Amino acid sequence: DAGVIQSPRHEVTEMGQEVTLRCKPISGHNSLFWYRQTMMRGLELLIYFNNNVPIDDSGMPEDRFSAKMPNASFSTLKIQPSEPRDSAVYFCASSRQGGYGNEQFFGPGTRLTVL
Amino acid sequence: GQQLNQSPQSMFIQEGEDVSMNCTSSSIFNTWLWYKQDPGEGPVLLIALYKAGELTSNGRLTAQFGITRKDSFLNISASIPSDVGIYFCAGQKGGADGLTFGKGTHLIIQP
């Protein structure tokens, strides 16, 4: 089985540019999570979806950040305009809700550098 | 946002030694999980705990869900070089919720 797929793996952009990160969850999983990892703040939850519906976006830092999940197999995280402090590794994770186990499985991450 | 208190921050040990790390929280979590992250990769799930007091093993790894539901520990027995990496604890309130992570324990093994 393919795991969570993220693209691109690395992104370097200039301040003010729009950045779009992409995620394909594991087939059959109905929950999707976006996390951000930095040295200072560690791993933080940004937003998550259940059955394609955004449930909690309280972790999204600012209005410059937006996320969508148009269908069960695809999600995007967009930053517009990007700023140097957005530089971080962004992870997508997915899980299957219901039943006893609902472990989250992480993708390899997108390393974003904003110059 | 809230984070879990994970300790120690780093450990320098000899190959073959046992390792112990723990996480505490000021609030209750209904699920505790332990992940390992290697450089350039995403966290990989090691052990998930669902019941207070639960003790679960996965090979040389053993983890426990504290009775108060505010803490958990992870033990690694007879460490080997491939155990090197960063270990994260994570707590989850409800089954469909996002995870709250500790800051990680960086494990370094000297041969």
Image: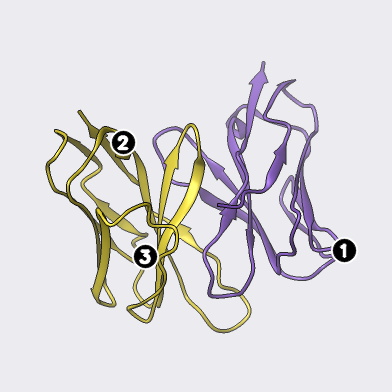
User: Dot 2: what SS?
Assistant: loop
Of the chain colours in the picture, the one used for chain B is purple
- Indicate which disc residue B56 carries: none
At 26% across and 33% down in the image, what residue appears? A84
Q: Alpha-carbon distance for marks 3 and 2?
A: 31 Å
| Relative image position of residue A10 (x, y in whole percent) | 23, 38
At 37% across and 82% down in the image, what residue appears? A51
Q: Can the viewer see residue A29?
A: no
Q: Chain of mark 1?
A: B
Residue sticking out furthest to the top: B111
Of the chain colours in the picture, the one used for chain A is yellow
Image position of B96 (left or right of A78): right
Colouring convention used in this rendered image of the protein: by chain
Judging by the rendered image, the residue that carries numbered circle 2 is A87
Judging by the rendered image, the residue that carries numbered circle 1 is B67
Quarter of the image for residue A12 reads top left
User: Dot 1: what SS?
Assistant: loop
| Relative image position of residue A19 (x, y in whole percent) | 17, 48
Nearer mark to the viewer, of 3 and 2: 2
Q: Is residue B30 above or below residue B2?
A: below
Judging by the rendered image, the residue that carries numbered circle 3 is A1
Q: Residues within 10 Å of mark 3 (few under 14, many from 20)?
A: few
Q: Are marks 1 and 3 in contact (CB under 8 Å)?
A: no
**Amino acid bearing label 3:** Asp
| Relative image position of residue B18 (x, y in whole percent) | 80, 32
Q: Chain of mark 3?
A: A
**Amino acid bearing label 1:** Ile
